[in-house]
Amino acid sequence: MIQINDFSAGANNYIDRAKLGEKVAVMMRDCIPETGSLESGYNDLPVPAESPVDLGHWGDSDRSVAKQFGRTYWSNNLAQSAPYYGGDHYALGVPYPDFPPELSTTDDEGSKRKGRYRYCMTYVRDGYESAPGPVGDGYFSSIELAEGKAVRYLAGAPPEGITAVNVYRTIAEGAEFYLLESLTPEEAAALRTDKLADNDLLMRNVLESLYYLPPPDGGKYLTEQSETFFLAVGDKLYYSEVSNCHAWNPSSWISFEDDITGIVEEFQGILVLTANRVYRVTGNDVLTIAKQEIPTRQGCTNWRSCATLSNAPIWLSNDGLCMWDGQSVKLLSFQRYRIDNTPRFAVSANDCYWLFGDRGVIVYDLRSGGIFYSLSTLADYAWYDVDKDTLYLRREGVYYRQGASRTRRTGFYRSALLGGNLPLTQMRKLRISSSGMVEVTLRNHLNKIVFKGTVPGGATREIWLPSGKWTRGCDIEVSFTGTLREIALTPVQAMA
């Protein structure tokens, strides 16, 4: 007797079907194991939306998305020119002034200052302050002040979206900048006079945003870890200031041997991936940042395959699907599943990793014990909404809730080659336990069809198979809708 009543081992399309056990399938498509039985999946339900934003999502197939303090930002990983970044309110980085304040002198009997003074200004947007300008000598203006003279300065109207203009000044012959005034955009457009004495200025706040520049051009794979944002530009990894994703010190980067092909958040840092190497990066400032090369050659071939599964980084290498468990890189698909479709993107939902490609979806199901199966779903983008516990899909401009329809798909299952080298009898009974009608195909070890027919569902059913010499071994392929509980072949007469 050949019996399959436990489908929980998933599929294996890597090893020859004659060498798989009876619990392992050659193919499982559009069906998943539930409590040992096999359930065909549900169809997707269309939802009214014109873009992901209508569903509260800001990502897309070409973007890497990160959040900080409730706001969403992204890098456009395919951008060849600006804009390289975006956001739900504004992009990364606060623009800095194109020019320093314009200065002139004026008579003022109350002024007791004398000497050389420097002025600069910064822009403020939503509480984040910009740098006064590019690193160098061009971000400030200077003036020589004779005793009895005061300074008149013009900051100029800031660009749209800037909420304040902070003007800074040094003391006579000094190098440190102190806050002189914080101006509204309207005040910044008017000419103003500085009469403040040096001793009073020393009580003001010191300029801290000298190196708070926008992110570098061409950054890819935006990732957040421990309130720090990371970006890749060629073979360099840039990182922002802690808790300030708009502040990117141009000196805050570390280099790698090859161009970076992906970044994934991990348990205590990030994984930086190149074509054939994996690095673990921890820390988030110049004093703590450190990289460690992981002894593996399972690099990343396509950044679209990168995701996290139960907080563990997972990605596709040249050799298959990989996962970092905090200690080593595991090649999950080795001798288990051959991935031969081109990745479009990947998403994790409910402890399952979904790798979308041009031939459908390959699923690595950690919830069911780390098994593989496939879905016929085609989509050009997908994302998982944690708050709604919903996986959304976009297909040909239409948006769907995955598996939310009341109608089921047709599931397909094909077993390994069963029976081994034992000769099969000329007649057998086929027993099927299913909630619905099942289409059955039996093939012998030569892959020749020896039976094809329909078995009614609703209970356990038995049908007689045609007589004839089946040679040695067979596999069973079924298509069904609903629940498949058991497949069995019962011999009528055993051959010697």
Image (cartoon, grey):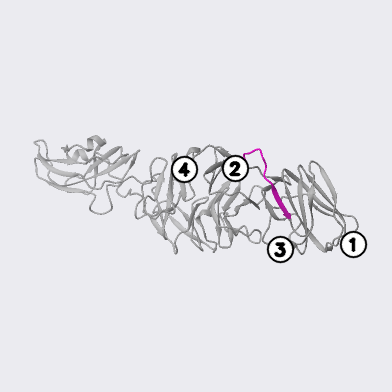
Q: Please tell me which of labels 3 and 4 falls first in the chain.
A: 3
Q: Are marks 1 and 2 in contact (CB under 8 Å)?
A: no
- Label 3 and label 4: CA atoms lie apart by 43 Å
Q: Which residue is mark 4?
A: 58
Magenta part, dominant SS: loop
Q: CA distance from mark 4 to mark 1?
A: 65 Å
Pointers 2 and 3 in contact (C-beta within 8 Å): no
SS for callout 4: loop
Magenta residues, start to end: 402-414
Q: Which residue is mark 3?
A: 16
Residue 83 visible to an observer of this rendering: yes
Q: Is residue 381 magenta?
A: no
- State the residue position of label 1: 495
> How far, Cα to Cα, is label 3 from label 1?
26 Å
Residue on which the image places disc 2? 402
Q: Amino acid at mark 2?
A: Gln
Could you tell me which residue is drawn at 51 percent across and 57 percent down? 302
